[in-house]
Image (cartoon, coloured by chain):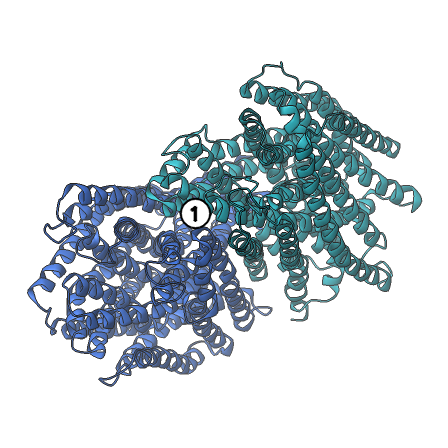
Chain colours: A cyan, B blue
Amino acid sequence: MEKYFILGFLGSILALGFSVIQRRRVLSVSEGNERMQKIAAAIRSGANAYLKHQYTTVFKVFGIVFVLLLILAFASGGRMLSRVTPFAFLTGGIFSMLAGYIGMKIATSANARTANAASESLNKGLRVAFSSGSVMGFSVVGLGMLDVTMWFFILRYALGITEPEQIGSIMVMNGMGASFMALFARVGGGIYTKAADVGADLVGKVEAGIPEDDPRNPATIADNVGDNVGDVAGMGADLYESYVGSILATFSLGAIAGYGFQGMLLPLLLAVVGILCSILGSFLIRTKEDASQEDLLKSLRTGTYSAAILAAVLGAPLTYFLLHSWGVYIAILCGLVGGCVIGYFTEYYTSDTYKPTRELAAESETGSATIIIGGLSLGMRSTMVSILVVAAAVLLSFYCAGGARSFNMGLYGIGIAGVGMLSTLGITLATDAYGPVADNAGGIAQMAELPEEVRERTDALDSLGNTTAATGKGFAIGSASLTALALLVSYVDIVQSKTEEVLDLSLTNPLMLVGLFIGTMLTFLFTSLTMNGVERAAQSIVVEVRRQFKEIKGIMDYQADPEYARCVALCTKGALHEMIAPALIAVVMPIITGLILGPVGVVGMLGGVSVSGFAMAVFMSNAGGAWDNAKKYIEAGHHGGKGSEQHKAAVVGDTVGDPLKDTSGPSLNILIKLCSTVSIVFSGLILAFNLVGLL
Amino acid sequence: MEKYFILGFLGSILALGFSVIQRRRVLSVSEGNERMQKIAAAIRSGANAYLKHQYTTVFKVFGIVFVLLLILAFASGGRMLSRVTPFAFLTGGIFSMLAGYIGMKIATSANARTANAASESLNKGLRVAFSSGSVMGFSVVGLGMLDVTMWFFILRYALGITEPEQIGSIMVMNGMGASFMALFARVGGGIYTKAADVGADLVGKVEAGIPEDDPRNPATIADNVGDNVGDVAGMGADLYESYVGSILATFSLGAIAGYGFQGMLLPLLLAVVGILCSILGSFLIRTKEDASQEDLLKSLRTGTYSAAILAAVLGAPLTYFLLHSWGVYIAILCGLVGGCVIGYFTEYYTSDTYKPTRELAAESETGSATIIIGGLSLGMRSTMVSILVVAAAVLLSFYCAGGARSFNMGLYGIGIAGVGMLSTLGITLATDAYGPVADNAGGIAQMAELPEEVRERTDALDSLGNTTAATGKGFAIGSASLTALALLVSYVDIVQSKTEEVLDLSLTNPLMLVGLFIGTMLTFLFTSLTMNGVERAAQSIVVEVRRQFKEIKGIMDYQADPEYARCVALCTKGALHEMIAPALIAVVMPIITGLILGPVGVVGMLGGVSVSGFAMAVFMSNAGGAWDNAKKYIEAGHHGGKGSEQHKAAVVGDTVGDPLKDTSGPSLNILIKLCSTVSIVFSGLILAFNLVGLL
């Protein structure tokens, strides 16, 4: 059976190959006139410089953790930690970084090209932007497959481990490197992009009254750089982590359920099938030259839904052949359908074509305070659907895949549902990652003073991107919750396998309750730190932009150029400085909790952070998205339109929402998984030393 | 041993008697000049009218629930529910209502008197306001003692039940009526007060630029009425519920722990001792005639801390005499100290004498968006201390009172810690409840155009009230979390006593995880509904105030009186309409969860709502408090002072914070306990019928 794992390499080659072809397609388009090339180059060099700094900082932290893991593994003779884990920690981190880096590289090459292509037609613009998104989408899944398959072969053949249980419990720890890197990328990139955005908007739009992306705004290049380092590189690393994490957690549960290598092969092959379906789906994304925005959306949806349906169809024989269980197949379907439903409702709550966002826009009539209260309320209300969908998916997968008959097989169902949700990530991520490219293209069109119609087209692409991004977020967030539960269960199994004592995991155990409190606290603390990071970095931009407007004469009448580079440098400095504390807390807290409260407290903490983190992430993403689109709705001429008091109120809402939806919210997805893998990696240490164990 | 329960009546008589004496002291002061009397009468009649409407609505709901409970109890022959519970549900509701009503009555009589006394001296103003607070504080504890003791005697002697376990499990259900009434009072009153406040501020302060409590503002009477129906009547019902809830939960745990009637006598007598100490503490609150604001605060603190220390000292022999356990005594100390520590940190995060609020005020420099982000971040960060204190209190009480030796005795420790925290509620509530009276006095001073110095004095009293209110909130919120945990444990015990099957309460049980998700969802949903309620009601006030400014000529130059009564009526209508949904959801959700997921799911839900509700409540209270005081700090002349752009930004923050800190936040405390008692009351029904039981 193990030989079929070679198909993982095939999937990887397919995905990476398709990614290379798409890259060529993008690069074959012209970057436009000299001014566009110059702007694109400035964005590119800003993004490169930031990522270089970021990676340098992160590598130092990685180096320290690597050495600590090495000491723990070798000093304990492999008892507390497998000797493989420190190295897998490194590859996970490097691959996750690469996924983000490749995405950023192509996005900064595609932005001016998209603007240029959009000056010909909407459809051409879409094609360039979507191809650029595909490069990242398929790089992420290709690299993920490579990492997973490679380590499987190392463990199985190079190290000769024959027990599936042992391979599963080692491989589940491999997610830590990817999660750790992803957290840095999301938090750092998220702080960068939102500091620039908030800083640019507060002074430019609100105080000076100039439009977004106006070349007179000193923070405008930084803002565009931010789209690439946050929304692209950060998202790439994030979804790499989600993808690999869901597969690895299911590996571990497959072994626990007694499915042996078949139980591992299923998520792997499901992912390979998903890659195939995603490529086929991509070919369906074609439109006529004179396509309207609706046609474009329809075309994108045809692509993603066809891929999902195809994966669902092909999943049936695959599951039956491997595990002879229709119940497991239903679990996969739960994942696929659940992701789509969450995506749909994310769109419902955040798009201005539906009631909630339109009502939110109307709340601007009574000022910024009411639109803020309204957005907070909308975001909180919107958690209901996501939670009910996840709850239904968990229960259905659990009971269909095993449940009353076999508890562990039921848990495997929850894990495989997460993999099902992400199986067609290649194409969903492509439709998601094209958004920031379109956003940047709009910025370049504005700064290069291209004709009004070009900006209109890039705006149409951008707005389309907001819709597809909502769907993408649904998948990311839904899968995160399922993977987190799978990891929690793996943790319990791994701990229980190392000790004779039966853990009392009952909720009435005060250690468990206190753990729940600590986990919830972690969610709030992490959110606070990331929001604060954005705010502090943004304030330094505000001060700088105000200074430039005041000191550099002639900016306003285009006589002098603002000093873009200073804002870029300030954002870089701010983001690097502010990302450290939240990232470290995610690693340190599970260890401290474990050292004091022992494994039971850790389980409680993981439950608390997973549940509250999920709810908070949905709340923040949707509140932020709704504010953003309420503002756009007003700008489209409702409630007084641009420049009115209502618009100003909506801009305040949008600004408050920025760090919520693009920094804190998406980082929480990673936080909950990083906490789980850190707990798993240090489980041996915690079992050996903990305070309550002494009582 | 049971005969000592008669001391409960003694405590009740002591408290109620002291309350009557304080009432006389208040009424002996003059209400001031004719204009003051007229304004006070308008506020009084508005508050009376609202409460009349509120009680009418609530009684209808109570009637329906009463009948349903009656059917459940009698149709099942008392198996699913004790026949006593429906009647205890009624008395709990009525007593909770009375507690709020008495508070409102005295507050609306004391406001003009405080203003009048303050025109003589600061100290005289304080005495009247504090006496008025004492009336409510001691009524709450007196009525609570009466309810608890009365039902004990009915069960023990009238019905002749001799088993402590049986009495404990019946009495723990008696909390439901009080919680249900408290939720209505908090939510309805909270929506009323904040709708009026937000509505008055948005148009009056922000748009028309007139000061707070200006007689030209049509919403100003409604605003003052709101202080009485929300901050006074709502708080009275709320703390009645907390007080009785903590005692009843401990009754049940005492019986479970095998302590028999001694285990019930301890919380009862501890409360009686607390009443005595509170009365003694009140006598220590005296200042010299020329006392400064600092002297006043010192004097108030001397009173509350002396009472707490005295209770701690007297608690030692009491505990030892009854249970021969120093461990239980340490648990009581944990509660007393924990409440003070949470109170201190609440003040630290929300008072402008400390760094966090000052930094928040500085964030107004970059506009309203940054001060909103900063406040959200501050509130979330502030949850850390409260959670760590509760975690420490839970673990210490558990391990000292039993822990490793006896699990159930440990749980009793958690319950008694909650009682310890609230034992001196009489005096802490008195210092808390005097705040809204001082606030109203300021409003009357402003409207009656009393000399500037009077307003300054009432402002000093009001600001003092903010500080003591912070401490009061610390006690309320801390005790809520401990009581919720105690109720959760009682629930499990009651369910387990009714079924042979051993419940799998492990966190890895998917039913438990799904329950956690549902509980967290409930917190978010409830918060959203209450915030939305305030917003909708406030918007109707904004529209009405704008209309009056526009249509009634001469308001601005004092030529015409605004139509205050219309705003009062609109607030009443809005609050009554908006309070129904959130209150019902709190009752319906535990039942639906139970019917679908069974008792395990209910336990998960209770865990989820308790933990997330606690964190959310702390976050909201502190964020709102900090925004409020940041605004006051700016008004005191920092960052541009009154009327500056920074001040406008801070007003937006304050307005956003209003529903958070005075409606949603405090209601969450009640929500988590109501969910628990509803679950307990319907546990028989749920055990008999639930969907997962069929699988």
Q: Secondary structure at mark 1?
A: helix
Residue at image position (68%, 51%) is A184
Q: On the rendered structure, is B99 left or right of A264?
A: left
The answer to whether residue B27 is above or below residue B481 is below
Say which amino acid is labelled 1.
Ser
Q: Quadrant of residue B399?
A: bottom right
Q: On the rendered structure, is B435 left or right of A249?
A: left
The C terminus of chain A lies in quadrant: bottom right
Q: Nearer the viewer, residue A218 or B420?
A: A218
Q: Residues within 10 Å of mark 1 (few under 14, many from 20)?
A: many
The answer to whether residue A541 is above or below residue A349 is below
Q: Nearer the viewer, residue B614 or B381?
A: B381
Q: Residue beneath label 1, please?
A: B683
Residue at image position (25%, 64%) is B439
Q: Position of residue B77 (x, y in %)?
A: 34, 45
The N terminus of chain A lies in quadrant: top right
The answer to whether residue A450 is above or below residue B653 is above
Q: Position of residue B84 (x, y in %)?
A: 30, 53
Q: Position of residue B602 (x, y in %)?
A: 48, 46
In this view, which residue lies farthest toward the left?
Answer: B34
Q: How many marks?
A: 1
Q: On the rendered structure, is B540 left or right of A653?
A: left
Q: Quadrant of residue B16?
A: bottom left
